[in-house]
Image (cartoon, rainbow, N blue to C red):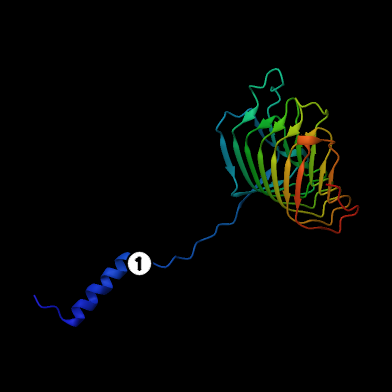
Amino acid sequence: MTRTASTFAITLMAFFCAIVPAWPQVQTVNAPQLVNLTQPLIYDTLPQGTVIDLSGYYLKATVPMSAMVIIRSPAATPSNPGPQNMFVTLRFGIIDGNGMATSIVRITETTDSTIEIAAAVNSASNCVILDGGNFMTANNHIRIGAIANCGGNGLLVQTATNSGSYNVQGNHIEVGQVINNGGSGIAVITGAWANTFIVGPVEHNVYFGCYDGSGGSGGYVNHWIVNGANSNGLGQVC
């Protein structure tokens, strides 16, 4: 069979259309689903490997509560570490205290886990709290896009005792921005050692941009990378 020039051109076009992908189509973007919270979300003693993904939700407090999200395992102790939250993954979108929640997120007795928050905003007091609780909060990867407009410290890291069995240690903590909080942007107090903080702008906080009063030494100091700190009432000590 003899092919004409036009037949050859059509065949060639069909070949290229088969191997060249179509242009990407416009994606439909869905707004996050609003959930009005009337009580805290409590994640207590989760099985290892648990994955909880609420990143597509906008959580908003509508009544007073101590914290909107509580991640804990109070049965875990230094002599009984088994119940601790371990190897779990939790992801959240925007968590808005709406001036009603005392705190946005409180994490205790949790180790070797991943916690992600798009934004934590508008709490009446300290916004995000890391505390050893009855055991320790250690070796976690924590990522927060922004902490803003909270009545107390943006991020408070503390434990009631300096004991290595109960403290907050070895966590890798990333925060995109910490802005406009009524206390310090980040306050690290007693019993918080060997944590790594990687922080974007820390600005317009009433007290310190960041403050490290943990007293760790040697291999137990906290390590800080802060990219831009300005307009904080007392500067920064970290």
Where residue 73 appears, as percent x and y from the top left, is 68, 27
The residue shown at (76%, 28%) is 133
User: Is residue 162 in sight in this rendering?
Assistant: yes
The residue shown at (76%, 47%) is 224
Where residue 149 appears, as percent x and y from the top left, is 80, 52
Image quadrant of residue 37? top right
Left or right: residue 181 versus residue 34 is right
User: Is residue 193 in sight in this rendering?
Assistant: no
* Residue most extreme to the right: 234
Q: Nearer the viewer, residue 113 or 47?
A: 113
The residue shown at (73%, 45%) is 197
The residue shown at (70%, 29%) is 109
Left or right: residue 68 versus residue 183 is left
Residue occupied by mark 1: 20
* Residue most extreme to the bottom: 5
Left or right: residue 114 versus residue 162 is left
Image quadrant of residue 18? bottom left
The amino acid type of the residue labelled 1 equals Val
* Residue most extreme to the left: 1
* Mark 1 element type: loop
Q: Nearer the viewer, residue 222 or 83?
A: 222
